Image (cartoon, rainbow, N blue to C red):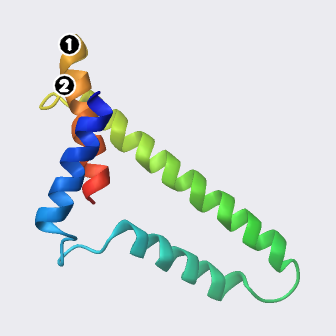
Amino acid sequence: MSNVISLLVGWLLDLIFGDPARLPHPIVWFGMAIAFCEHRLNKGSRRKLKGALISIILIVAIFVITYLLRSLCERSMFLATPHSQRENVQCSMFFDALAVFY
């Protein structure tokens, strides 16, 4: 049930505020990283191998960044304490809503 609430809150925030004009969207950053790598590595021999390696590296990097942000959120003294399951669930819901919004 908490996942449904997180999705609804994130969706409502996105409807109300839209994408922040001042901040580039994370997908734009990802696209810039792909373009950077393509210009540097998409020439010469072994282009497919280099493309596959960059794909794996970028996917793993996004996973690690997301994992670290979520861990930071769950350990934050402002949002949760290790002794409170309810606060950890609230922190998880906050992070999920923020991820859907942004």
Q: Which mark is residue 45?
A: none
Given residues 10 and 25, the one toward you in this image is 10
Q: Please determine whether, in this image, residue 45 is positioned above or below residue 17.
A: below
Q: Residue furthest top?
A: 83
The three-letter amino acid code for the residue at tag 1 is: Ser
Q: Is residue 35 left or right of residue 19?
A: right
Q: Is residue 91 left or right of residue 62?
A: left
**x then y, percent, for residue 35:** 56, 83
**x then y, percent, for residue 40:** 66, 85
The three-letter amino acid code for the residue at tag 2 is: Ala
Residue under the point 27% across and 29% down: 2
Given residues 22 and 17, the one toward you in this image is 17
Q: CA distance from mark 2 to mark 1?
A: 7 Å
Q: Please determine whether, in this image, residue 40 is positioned above or below residue 12.
A: below
Q: Are marks 2 and 1 in contact (CB under 8 Å)?
A: yes
Q: Please determine whether, in this image, residue 26 is positioned above or below residue 90.
A: below
Residue under the point 52% across and 74% down: 33
**x then y, percent, for residue 50:** 77, 72
How many marks do you count on the picture? 2
**x then y, percent, for residue 93:** 25, 35
Residue under the point 25% across and 57% down: 101
Q: Is residue 18 left or right of residue 1?
A: left
Residue under the point 18% across and 71% down: 20
Q: According to the image, label 2 marks what residue?
A: 80
Q: Residue furthest right?
A: 45
Label 2: which secondary element = loop
Label 1: which secondary element = loop
Q: Quadrant of the N terminus?
A: top left
Q: According to the image, label 1 marks what residue?
A: 84
Q: Quadrant of the C terminus?
A: bottom left
